[in-house]
Amino acid sequence: MATITTNPQLPATMRALVRTGKGQPVELQELPTPTPTHGSIVVKVLHATMDVAATRIIDGHTPFTYPFPSTPGARAIGRVAATGPDTTSFSVGQLVMLEPGLRPRDSKDTIYLWSFHDGWTPMGRKFIEDNWRQGLFAEYARCPLENCWALDEQVLCTQFGYSTAELTAISLYPIAFAGFRNVKLTAGETVLVAPATGSYSGAAVGLAVAMGANVIAAGRNIDVLERLKATHGERVKIVQLKGDAQVDSAAFKERFGRPVDVFIDVSPPQASGSTITRSGLMALGPYGRCVLMGFTTDDSIAVPYSHAVANNLTIRAQFMYHAADVRGLLRLFESGILKLGKSGGVEVVGEFKLEDHEKAGKAAVENPQFGKLVVLSL
């Protein structure tokens, strides 16, 4: 049944951060408040995530392209401010999560990253330029229906006690959840997360535990690794990487006394040229599965060929996620199986206003590891 909603009067203008050109300082501008169209709703942004990726996009230090002028900001928590003519389930005032995995309705095999990547084709660039220039570093945003996810506020905020700012962490998890689903992770298996100290890879550690796996978390930052272990308990073992594929691989297999079943690699561009992928593949046992979800610039992967063949390994690449992954993930959070807040190792270390975006960016760069949230609160 369609939702019957009378949209309230929105303000004529709003404030938003605007990128005017690559490498140009972002500007705080007053813009017309967007109105909903078919396939969209307008959301009043409560908290938008400022992370290292966002700072690189703002500074122009990214290989991704996006049209100018445009508003950055890819992940947020907000409330529905106005619904479109074809909205069937959202209602004004409803708490929602906004995430960037944008798929055109008539091309589900194509995905763009709303507010920071317009794809690799002229068609994709036109699609974004004509429709979705404006991201979430704004007081209001017109959002694709497919990127808006209703949250059970009664459960998450009232029952579990999470703040709305803490809920911004939810959008870190769909990438790893899609990876685990696509290699059919099952309870009781051993998962290697390497590296495991970044925002997305750190989320994979708690997620794998929630899905019933034992986890090896690997990285160079021992303090972050120790915090992950303290948060998730005895089912998490840690390995500080040495940079030697044979040494690291042996350490992975030693932690639980057996080879690894699933290896997830969410390496950032900074990990290009490292031995992480090879050491992880070498740690896989018979019928082991690897899912590559990072963004390194390596031209080739040093796959141990004979080891892969002898052990019947599956190596899969996975870019982002699908709607079914997000729906399944939200069930984990709303059931209480997957934790946020202190029990999930998540804390808000900085809240800033739009006009203080430079301070927010600095705080994000200083806190790049998992569980340290910096948000623009509007």
Image (tube, rainbow, N blue to C red):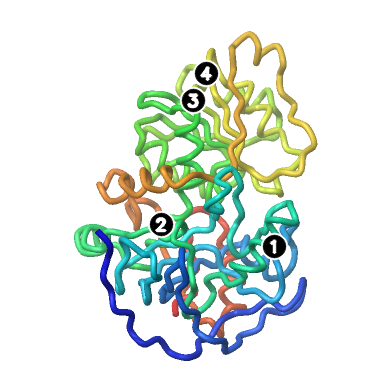
Q: Could you say whether the residue bearing mark 4 is in a helix, strand or loop?
A: loop
Determine the image quadrant of residue 297. Answer: top right
Image check: 266 left or right of 339?
Answer: right
Considering only order in the chain, which callout, 1 or 2, is on the residue closer to the N terminus?
1
Nearest to viewer (mark 4 / mark 3)? 4
Determine which residue is flagged by label 4.
Answer: 259
Task: State the residue position of label 3.
Answer: 255
Q: Is residue 355 visible?
A: yes
Which of 87/242 is in front?
87
Label whose residue precedes the other's in the sequence (2 or 4): 4
Find disc 2 in the rendering and name its residue.
346
Q: Residue at the spot x=61%, y=47% of the render?
A: 110
Residue tagged 1: 126
On the picture, is 290 further left or further right than 167?
A: right
Label 2 Cα neighbours within 10 Å, binned few <14 / some 14-19 / many ≥20: some
Instruction: Say which of 30 and 355 sits in front.
Output: 30
- Compared with 335, 285 (above or below) is above
Q: Quadrant of the C terminus?
A: bottom left
Rendered location of residue 179, percent (x, y)? 51, 36
**Residue kind at label 4, given as amino acid type:** Pro
Helix, strand, or loop for circle 2? loop
Task: Compute the Cα span from label 2 to label 3.
Answer: 26 Å
